[in-house]
Image: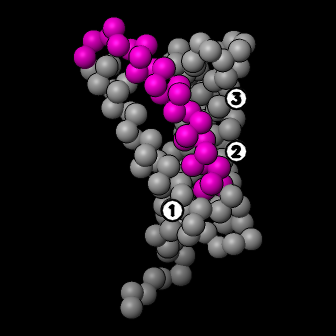
Amino acid sequence: MIRRSPGTPSRDRRLALGLAGLLGTAAVLHVVRPEPFDSIVPRSLPGEPRFWTYASGAAEGAVAAAVAHPRTRRAGGWAAAALFVAVFPANVSMALHWDRKDPLYRAIGWGRLPLQVPLVLWAVRIARSAPRG
């Protein structure tokens, strides 16, 4: 049996805090540098792209907070999985929009799409491993 010293976070806690950090960073970037996010908002959404940039950033921030806190981690994990699925159309839009850019941008645009799968699985793992209520 491996003994952890008091205060050493468990693997599940580290995974949760890592995901919270990723989501929190993305949330901050949506506010600090909204232009790149504006450019990938699907044109089919009503209203201004900046609204959707800020709304998705706020959602990421709220989900990050939920994943970070042990009492809300289970719900936060499920919310993170749903969020990653919900933003997938924006990632597709970005890949299609960047199809005329240089090869590096095209590779980034298309390469991001399959990365949604491990993000969803990461979030689901956190939701399933968190204690109930």
At mark 2, the secondary structure is helix
Residue beneath label 2, please? 62
Quadrant of the drawing holding the N terminus: bottom left
Amino acid type, mark 2: Ala
Q: How many marks?
A: 3
In the rendered structure, are the residues bearing label 3 and label 2 in contact, judged by CB atoms less than 8 Å apart? no
Q: Which residues are magenta?
A: 76-103
Q: Is residue 18 visible?
A: no
Amino acid type, mark 1: Arg
Q: Position of 117 compared to 72: left or right?
A: left
Q: Which mark is residue 55?
A: 3
Q: Main secondary structure of the magenta part?
A: helix
For image coordinates 65% across by 62% down, the residue present is: 74
Amino acid type, mark 3: Ala
Q: Position of residue 59 (x, y in %)?
A: 68, 38
Q: Position of residue 54 (x, y in %)?
A: 68, 26
Quadrant of the drawing holding the C terminus: bottom right
